[in-house]
Amino acid sequence: MRYFIENKCRDTCITTLVLLYILSGFVNICTGKTVEVNREKSFKREHQGVVDRIEEKFYIILLENDNREIVVPIDKVEEEINPSTWVSIYFEDNRVRGISVDDNKTRKERRRLTVLRQQLNEKRK
């Protein structure tokens, strides 16, 4: 009987710890304290990304080279950013440390899209 109780307590503790770990990661992402990019150790890095959309109080940013999205609370960004705006995201130890608008890349991509739309319209005629 004692063996059964010890194993049951151990299993319950492990389950509780796993749930706490999962919930703490979710809370950190929602509050903007941590945005996990990957599990490997990283130091200071810069990524390019585009603001895909705004959902409630969060920017959804698609990272250019990683083919993944990150969620950043709007109140953690100093300036207002519109969808389709390109940004530089600065990471340190897998946490977002700063975001700045990349005006040059935004203009360049908008020009490229305008040309593609014009070409598409010409083919339709």
Image (cartoon, rainbow, N blue to C red):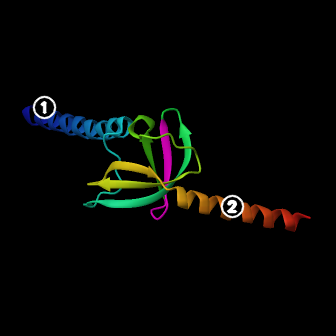
In the foreground, 120 or 3: 120
Q: Quadrant of the C terminus?
A: bottom right
Q: Position of residue 33 (x, y in %)?
A: 31, 40
The residue segment tinted magenta is 58-67
Q: Which residue is mark 2?
A: 113
Q: Which residue is mark 1?
A: 5
Q: How crowded is the residue under tag 2: few (<14 C-alpha within 10 Å), some, or many (20+)?
A: few
For residue 61, above or below residue 80: below
All told, the count of numbered labels is 2
**Hey, what amino acid is under mark 1?**
Ile
Numbered disc 1: secondary structure: helix
Percent of width and height locating residue 110: 65, 58
Screen quadrant of the N terminus: top left
Type of secondary structure dominating the magenta stretch: strand
Asked if residue 104 lies left or right of residue 97, the reply is: right
Disc 2 to disc 1, C-alpha distance: 65 Å
Q: Which mark is residue 50?
A: none
Quarter location, residue 124: bottom right
